[in-house]
Structure formats: C-alpha cells, structure tokens
C-alpha cells in the first residue's frame, strides 16, 4: 500500500481480483500510519470505529459494482467543515465539544460519492493564521522537519496528505490557507474561484473570501474532488449557478499558454533567495518548453495585505459575534447575568489571535473609522481585482511563488502579527480578486524543505488551470 498515492491507483488496486487490497485493509493502513505519526498533531479526532464500518459497507458496494466515483478515497476534513453528528470546533476552545447538527454541502457531496471521511484535521483557530500555531489543540509539525511549522491555516490537512495519513483532505482558503500549507508540505493545494463551491456548513471566517479547496498529492485527485464538491446549492446563494464542467475529462491543452509573472514579486524584499531561485527556474523551464512567460507590473502588491486584513477582520468581527456563550459551545463558569456571560465566555473562549482580529475588525467598522478603513479597503479591493483581471485578459495565468519562504521554525514568528500577516503577500491577491489559484510543489530547498509555485487563473477557469498544472508538473519531472 505504500506505493499507492492517487485515487486512480487505489481504484486500480481495489479492482484486482486477488483482493490483496480491500477498503478495510486500506483503512487499517491509514489508521496505523496516523497512530505512528501522532506527534505531527495533524488530526484532532480520528473517526476510527465509524471509518472501519463504512469501509466494510463501501467494499460491498464495490463488489456489487454500485460504488460512487470516490470509492477508495480516504479523506480528512479540516475542523471547520461541519459533519452531522460529529464534533466541529474550528480548533477553538469556544466550540470545544460542539457537535454539528447538520452536514456541510461539501461533506454531503463527498459521502454521496462514497468517500470515506477518516477524521477532522487540526487548523488555526477559526482559520486565522498561516502557521497552525493558533490552534487550541497546539501546532501541527511539518513531516519534512518536525521543528518546522506546517503552514496554515489548513496545516493538519496539508501534513496529513504529506505524511500519507490519508489520501486527500479538504481545507478552506480565505487568503491562502489551502495553498500556503500545501506549499510548505510539498503537496498540491487548490483554491477555487469564489462562488464555485458552496460555503454551507463551513464555519465562517470572512464570508466574501472563504472557499473550500482540496489538498492532494496529484492534480487528478484535485480535479475529481473539485468536480464532486463544486456547483450551485440552495443553501448558499453565493454558490454560482454556472454549470460545473468536467475537470477530470478535460483534454490537456496542447497550446502553449501565455503566463505573466509579477516583476514586483520577483523583486520583493522578503523573498527568500532560494524561493527566488525556484521562481526563476520555473520561469526558465516554462520558457524552454515553449511557453511565453513575461514580466508584468502590478503596482498594488504593497496594498494587498493591508486591504485583505482590513476586510477579513471586519467580516470576522461580524461572523464571530454569534459565539456569545448562549448560542453555541463554551459558557464561562464566571457568568452570572447576560453581560458577564458574553464577556467572560468570549474572553475565556477565544485565543489571542482571534481576539486581536475581532477588536481590529470592530474598530475598522466603527462609525468614526468606517470610511477611513473599511470603505477605503473595499475600493482598494476593486482596484486590485480590476488590475488582476486586466492582466488575465492578456495572459492565461499569473505566476507567483506561493509563499516568500519555506516552512519556518515553530515559534519563530508567532510574537509579531505584522510579520505573520506580511507572509501572505503572494496568496491574498487571488482571494481579493475571487479567482482560482493553485500551489504546485517544485522540489525542496537545500535544507530539504518543500517549496511551492502558484498559478492564478481566470474566474471559473479551474479546468484550464488544472490542465496547465498537469503540464507544469510534467515539466518538473524532466
Ligand atoms: N493567513 C491568512 C489569515 O490569517 C489566511 C488564512 C486563511 O486563508 N484562512 O487570514
């Protein structure tokens, strides 16, 4: 089972008549591996008994020729994705032990195709962070070097796939949370266009940014997962009614696409020399293969992080108002009346990063500062989106490193929020613009830590982005 790294390989092995590989055996393999790798802290809960019995049920469906297209897919879900009658906490004390009374649309769609959900994965508290260090359940360790962070906020999801604890994972990406940990862990991470995937049953962080995306070892698994979870949903009016094309059957384009890279990114101050070298090598390998790769200027690069944080903190302060010690989860023992219930439950239930964002978000929305910050940031978002779309009219894709550095030391940055926020410089552009973006592994740095390259596509252009990604990955192998 060691050599099996994609759904098609799993399904090939399951289809053999010798029964050397069965779903129950596959599940045992993953459970053993999870146990051996417990120190990575990737899972906050493993659904051991349930996944064992479900494996038996789906094995039977396979034998009867009645199984769905994800039969054999053993998948983990980030702990902010609701699954009926299962705990979901957004890795926050305030939701510790909370049990979801319903399933998210993405979970329903996975189950309808016979995927096996093996457990919930660690993440930053309410998906706020880029290192998984703000989780109530502690940081996740990178399997390439356990002293290093996993990236975040979907750190558990990326490490689970990196370390072979499950075949794939679903994360969420508000400003890079699928792509950046994928890059730190040497796996594939896709953020779909805003509106491509339903947000129903996803614990909201910033509603005009949040999207669910797959983390996988290969492009074909990202494609089949996206194809399964995407599409309109009566429970989420922001999920687009645009038909979902088949991402798996799309022919690989033979044409050589035109790719823009941002010159400001190549010259950016915080760019690690080894990441810069990987960026240049990727540009050169594409050029050698016959692609047109050209620099373009994107003068707003310095504004993407401030605009992103003003808007997401504002949205978070509103979204997190519901955690008040009355509606959900944790209620402080010190509460004696309504006001103390709110104050003490929220003070004790939220961690420092979440509190910081609620406070700043409330500030930028307050009457005296709304125009200066929130409404200004919305205008900046529009400029960034328009400029990005303008580049994408001339080019098929925009190329950027996923993160300015490789995975850093656990604890190295956590004291300084501004340093942490600035590390999102390359991922938030796609989030502000609402367009799809993918992080692809491009090998390791000299310390053996994975690096990732990112490609941004046109809104709802996931099929083209995935087709190109397949070709880019082939180039990496040559
Ligand atoms: N690091 C970014 C933030 O903290 C992105 C998080 C995310 O995409 N959920 O907001």
Image (cartoon, helix red, strand yellow):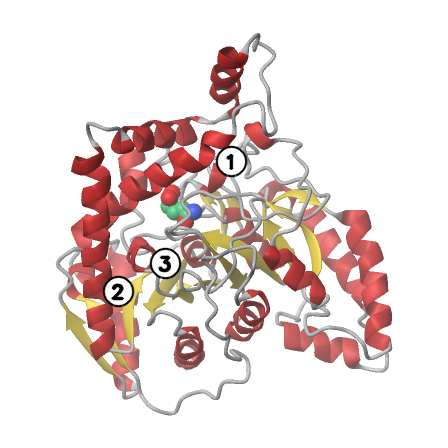
Q: Secondary structure at mark 1?
A: loop
Q: Secondary structure at mark 2?
A: helix
Q: Nearer the viewer, mark 1 or mark 2?
A: 1
Residue 105, given in percent of the width and then of the height, sits at: 60, 57
Q: Name the one closer to the observer, 62 or 458.
A: 458
**Alpha-carbon distance for marks 1 and 2?**
33 Å
Mark 1, Cα crowd under 10 Å, few <14 / some 14-19 / many 20+, is many
- The residue that mark 2 highlights is 277
Residue at image coords 55%, 72%: 227
**Alpha-carbon distance for marks 3 and 2?**
11 Å
Q: Is residue 307 left or right of residue 323?
A: left
Image quarter for residue 216? bottom right
Eyeballing the image, is 359 above or below 439? Answer: above
Eyeballing the image, is 88 above or below 347? Answer: below
Q: Nearer the viewer, mark 3 or mark 2?
A: 2
Q: First in sequence: mark 3 or mark 2?
A: 2
Residue at image coords 51%, 19%: 348
Q: First in sequence: mark 1 or mark 3?
A: 1
Residue 309, given in percent of the width and then of the height, sits at: 29, 42
Residue 345, given in percent of the width and then of the height, sits at: 53, 19
Q: Is residue 96 left or right of residue 50?
A: left
Q: Nearer the viewer, mark 1 or mark 3?
A: 1
Question: What's the mark number on residue 446?
Answer: 3
Q: Secondary structure at mark 3?
A: loop
Mark 3, Cα crowd under 10 Å, few <14 / some 14-19 / many 20+, is few
**Alpha-carbon distance for marks 1 and 3?**
29 Å
Image quarter for residue 13? bottom right
Mark 2, Cα crowd under 10 Å, few <14 / some 14-19 / many 20+, is some
């Amino acid at each position: 089972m060691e050599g099996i790294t994609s759904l098609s390989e799993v399904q090939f092995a399951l289809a053999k008549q010798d029964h050397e590989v069965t779903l129950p055996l596959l599940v045992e393999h993953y459970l053993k591996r999870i146990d051996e790798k417990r120190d990575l802290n990737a899972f906050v809960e493993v659904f051991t008994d349930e996944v064992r019995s479900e494996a038996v049920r789906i094995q039977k469906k396979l034998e009867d020729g009645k199984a769905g297209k994800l039969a054999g897919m053993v998948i983990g879900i980030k702990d902010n994705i609701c699954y009926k009658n299962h705990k979901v906490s957004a890795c926050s004390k305030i939701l510790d032990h909370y049990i979801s009374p319903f399933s998210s649309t993405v979970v329903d769609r996975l189950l309808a195709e016979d995927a096996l959900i093996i457990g919930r994965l660690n993440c930053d508290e309410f998906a706020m962070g880029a290192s998984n260090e703000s989780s109530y359940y502690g940081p996740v360790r990178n399997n390439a070097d356990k002293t290093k962070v996993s990236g975040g906020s979907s750190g558990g999801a990326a490490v689970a796939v990196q370390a072979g604890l499950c075949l794939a994972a679903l994360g969420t990406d508000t400003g890079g949370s699928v792509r950046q940990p994928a890059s730190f862990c040497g796996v594939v991470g896709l953020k779909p266009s805003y509106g491509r995937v339903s947000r129903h049953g996803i614990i909201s962080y910033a509603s005009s940014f949040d999207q669910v995306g797959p983390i996988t070892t290969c492009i074909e698994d990202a494609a089949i997962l996206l194809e399964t979870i995407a599409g309109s949903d009566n429970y989420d009016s922001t999920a687009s009614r645009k038909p979902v094309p088949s991402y798996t059957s799309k022919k690989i384009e033979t044409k050589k696409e035109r790719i823009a890279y941002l010159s400001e990114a190549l010259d950016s101050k915080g760019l690690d020399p080894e990441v810069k070298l990987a960026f240049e090598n990727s540009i050169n390998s594409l050029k050698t293969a016959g692609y047109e790769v050209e620099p373009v200027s994107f003068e707003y690069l310095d504004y993407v992080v401030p605009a992103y944080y003003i808007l997401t903190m504002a949205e978070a302060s509103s979204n997190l108002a519901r955690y008040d010690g009355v509606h959900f989860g944790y209620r402080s023992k010190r509460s004696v009346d309504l006001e103390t219930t709110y104050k003490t439950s929220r003070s004790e239930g939220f961690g420092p990063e979440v509190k910081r964002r609620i406070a700043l978000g409330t500030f930028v929305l307050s009457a005296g500062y709304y125009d200066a910050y929130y409404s200004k940031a919305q205008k900046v978002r529009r400029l960034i989106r328009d400029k990005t779309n303008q580049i994408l009219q001339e080019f098929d894709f925009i190329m950027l490193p996923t993160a300015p550095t490789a995975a850093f030391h656990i604890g190295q940055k956590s004291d300084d929020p501004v340093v942490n926020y600035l590390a999102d410089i390359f991922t938030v552009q796609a989030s502000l613009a609402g367009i799809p973006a993918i992080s692809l592994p491009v090998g390791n740095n000299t310390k053996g830590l994975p690096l990732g390259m990112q490609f941004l596509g046109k809104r709802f252009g996931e099929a083209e982005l995935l087709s190109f990604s397949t070709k880019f990955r082939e180039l990496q192998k040559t």
